[in-house]
Amino acid sequence: MAAPRIGLLGGAFDPPHRAHVALAESAVQALHLDHLLVLPTGQSWHRSGAGSAGDHRLAMARLAFADVARTQVLDLELTGRARVTPSTRCAICRHNGRAMTGT
């Protein structure tokens, strides 16, 4: 069996909007993704000052992406369980690929 094709979409999602959803839908279709993992950031690098609380952004992202096929919103960076860097992207894909295929 071929390895699943997994995409990552990160952002502040403060708030998530139609362009985020359109990007997710296009990525799933154009890249033939099996799964798209949406990762709201813990601390946005491009914004200063306080934004919406992480739990609110997570809830908004879950609502915004709920109808996008093969998409899952994860709280890894918001909860501090992972800081998404190039090396953790690989680990996230490996972990979720195994979880999604049952291996």
Image (cartoon, rainbow, N blue to C red):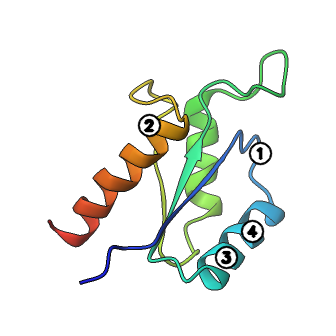
Label 3, secondary structure: give it. Answer: helix
| Foreground disc of the pair 3, 1 | 3
Q: Nearer the viewer, residue 7 or 63?
A: 7
Of the residues under marks 3 and 2, which one precedes in the sequence? 3
The amino acid type found where label 1 is placed reads Pro
Quarter-wise, where is residue 8 in the image? bottom right
Label 2, secondary structure: give it. Answer: loop
In this figure, which residue is indicated by the disc labeled 3? 25
Label 4, secondary structure: give it. Answer: helix
Q: Where does residue 36 sit, x and y in percent of width and height? A: 52, 65
Residue 73 in view (yes/no) = yes
- Label 3 with label 2: CB-CB less than 8 Å: no
Spatial CA distance of label 4 from label 2 is 21 Å
Spatial CA distance of label 3 from label 2 is 22 Å
Residue 76: give its label. 2
Spatial CA distance of label 3 from label 1 is 17 Å
Spatial CA distance of label 4 from label 3 is 6 Å
Residue 15: give its label. 1
The amino acid type found where label 3 is placed reads Glu
Residue 23: give its label. 4
Q: Which quarter shows the N terminus?
A: bottom left
Quarter-wise, where is residue 97 in the image? bottom left
Q: Where does residue 32 sit, x and y in percent of width and height? A: 55, 83
Of the residues under marks 1 and 2, which one precedes in the sequence? 1
